[in-house]
Amino acid sequence: KGLPHFAKGEVIKGFGRGSKELGIPTANYDVDVVNKLPDEVEPGIYFGFANIDNGCVHKMVMSVGWNPFYNNTKKSMETYVMHKFDSDFYGKTLKVVMLGYLRPEKNFASVDELIKAINGDVANAEIKLEADELTSFVGLRLFQNST
Ligand code: FMN
């Protein structure tokens, strides 16, 4: 419900756990972008496409909610862009289109299990985003325009 959802905003610093603890760097949006998320887009893990500063469009997975494993107090949208980048994207513009829902956010007994779950999400997203009706989103004008 509420999909596809388009979002655009500057990447801000999260808690920095993504890259250090998990080895999975996530790009965080500020509250203004999070607040634009319609209520029918429930917390959970989503897949779609993303780009940075109008660059190449890559697959992405996004966690929406409160990260029960870390018990965050602020709702967040954390995007893992499925591509190897040389540097971080703080201050850059992240555009995303959320296309599908994978699972609810869960709590885990260990960081290892969280990492396993995220790797599973990436594998699922990889397959689902190959669907013909979704690949057309790669060419979206949103990703090219500098507006
Ligand atoms: N956090 C949870 O507590 N439970 C989850 O089920 C969960 N699933 C995630 C799935 C994906 C695909 C991603 C990218 C993140 C997920 N997270 C989940 C959030 C991570 O805990 C979070 O990205 C990490 O704490 C890094 O946060 P930071 O950027 O604020 O440091």
Image (spheres, rainbow, N blue to C red):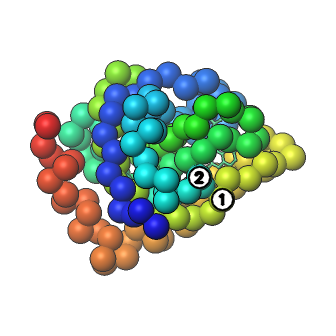
| 76, above or below 108, in the image | above
Farthest residue in the right direction?
A: 109
The answer to whether 126 appears left or right of 131 in the picture is right
Q: Residue at x 41, y 62 (%)?
A: 2
Helix, strand or loop at mark 2: loop
Q: Is residue 61 above or below residue 68?
A: below
Instruction: Tell me which label, 2 or 1, sits earlier in the chain.
Output: 2
96 or 38, nearer to the observer? 38
Ligand 1 resides in the quarter of the picture at top right
Q: Amino acid at mark 2?
A: Pro
Q: Position of residue 137 (x, y in %)?
A: 26, 63
Rendered residue at 63%/63% (across/down): 103
Residue 34 placement, left or right of 105: left
Q: Is mark 2 within 8 Å of ligand 1?
A: no
**Residue 31 horizontal/vertical position (percent):** 46, 30
Q: Please tell me which residue is depicted at 60% across the width and 44% down the height of the picture.
A: 65
Judging by the rendered image, the residue that carries numbered circle 2 is: 43
> Type of residue at label 1?
Pro
User: Which residue shows up at 38% across the image and 71% down it?
Assistant: 130
| Res 71 → quadrant | top right
Q: Which residue is mark 1?
A: 104
Is ligand 1 within 8 Å of the beta carbon of the residue shown at mark 1? Answer: yes
Q: Sort mark 1 into few (<14), some (14-19) or many (20+) by Cα contacts within 10 Å.
A: some
Q: Point out residue 145 in the picture as x, y percentages from the top left corner.
A: 12, 43
The correct choice, above or below, for 95 with respect to 14 in the image is below
Instruction: Name the side, left or right, on which 141 lies relative to 64.
Output: left
Q: Is residue 95 visible?
A: yes
**Do the residues bearing badges 2 and 1 touch, measured as CB atoms within 8 Å?**
yes
